[in-house]
Image (cartoon, grey):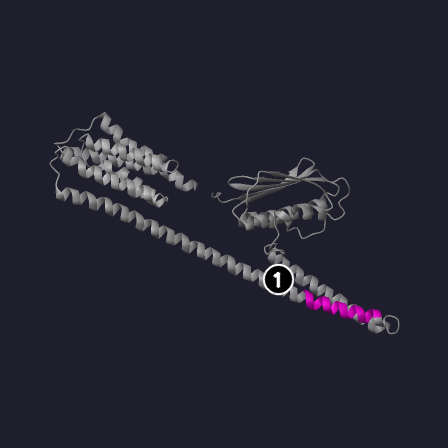
Amino acid sequence: MRSKSGFAPYLALIAAVFQVVLSQGAQRGQTWREPLDPFAYGLLLVGPLMIALHRKFPITTSVVTLLATYVYVWGGYPYGGVFISPIVMLVLLVLRRHRLTAWILAGATLVTFIVYPWATTQPERGLFHDLAVSSFILLTMVAAELVRIARERRAQQQRAAEEETRRQASEERLTMAQELHDVLAHNISLIHVQASTALHLIDDNPEQARTALAAIKTASKEVLGEMRSVLNVLREGAPRSPTAGLDRLDELIERSGLEVTLKRVGSRPLPPSVERAAYRIVQESLTNAARHAPGAAVTVRLEYGEREFAVRVTDTGATTPAVLSESGSGNGIPGMRERAAALGGTLVAGPSGAGFQVEARLPLPEETS
């Protein structure tokens, strides 16, 4: 967005230079027309100025540009460079989804340029002039439509490629989850059987019981290794509960065992992906608070903005020794940051006073009425 809007001043400058230079050249070849004067130069600069403002006021700037062009033409000034800005405006209107307005303005321009030579008895009036003007305007609009179609097709192909990439990633995660399920089911079943055997034989046959306990030790070590390997790959990428959302936040807070204050600022529907990411960020933040800051008061603040959704989890710091502070994989904050980045957002985590704060900002699509 920033790069596109930043190009407008350069486009406006290029249009201004070409309009002025080409009009000065046209003046030498069209000696029967009025010479360029300050008023004419002012009209030549209206279009480039409107190009610079077009993204913010597309229809208004287009109408002003065309009106300035009409006044210039009806003033009898030389043809030529003055038509650059109207062409740019009509093309931009088509590309920026104002197609109906573009075609209406193109029709108004066609009528104006055909009526003008007949109303002012200009020497170029006639069928050839009318056909030339009609063909040029029609060609401009058709070219703009073709560019629009090509851009939309390219964007659609890009979306399809991204969707395919996401689908493949989801399938890979589901495969890993299935693999993890199989490993857990197998090894836990084995542990259960061996434990039952050990309990049954521990009094009458201690040696066999010892063998069963050794098998339990081996199986438990294997399952822990498998879990660690798969979970390190998943890194919270595949939600354990696909339906996890902010509607379950109260339940999550209740299970956390912490003193949590939930604040909501505003309200609006959220995309499911944003809901899941926000829920997991709050979940991981509360887990970290319970592990590293037992006894702390925690505040969860949700801000529903027009363009972004902000999640802020702040704790006041530990009031009792953090006996579990060394446990965990250390992947909590990177995992949260990856969730935010996957949606085009940001996540910042760090000390806040005596406590700790996690703040995520997730972009939202514009609301549709």
Closer to the camera, 10 or 179? 179
Q: Position of residue 293 (x, y in %)?
A: 72, 43
Q: Amino acid at mark 1?
A: Ala
Rendered location of residue 303, percent (x, y): 58, 39
Residue 190 shown in magenta: yes
* In-front residue for pair 67/184: 67
The magenta segment: 184-199
Where is residue 65, by image quadrant?
Answer: top left
- Residue sitting at x 60%, y 57%: 234
Residue 216 found in image quarter: bottom right
- In this view, the residue farthest toward the right is 203
Q: Is residue 174 left or right of residue 71?
A: right
Q: Quadrant of the N terminus?
A: top left
Front one among 261 and 225: 261
Vertical relation: 100 (above or below) 38: below
Look at mark 1 in the image and give the residue it sits on: 177
Tell me if I can see residue 92 in this picture. no
Apparent side of residue 230 relative to residue 109 in the rendered image (left or right): right
- Whether residue 54 appears in magenta in the rendering, the answer is no
Q: Residues within 10 Å of mark 1 (few under 14, many from 20)?
A: some
Q: Is residue 332 left or right of residue 199?
A: left
Q: Nearer the viewer, residue 10 or 252?
A: 252
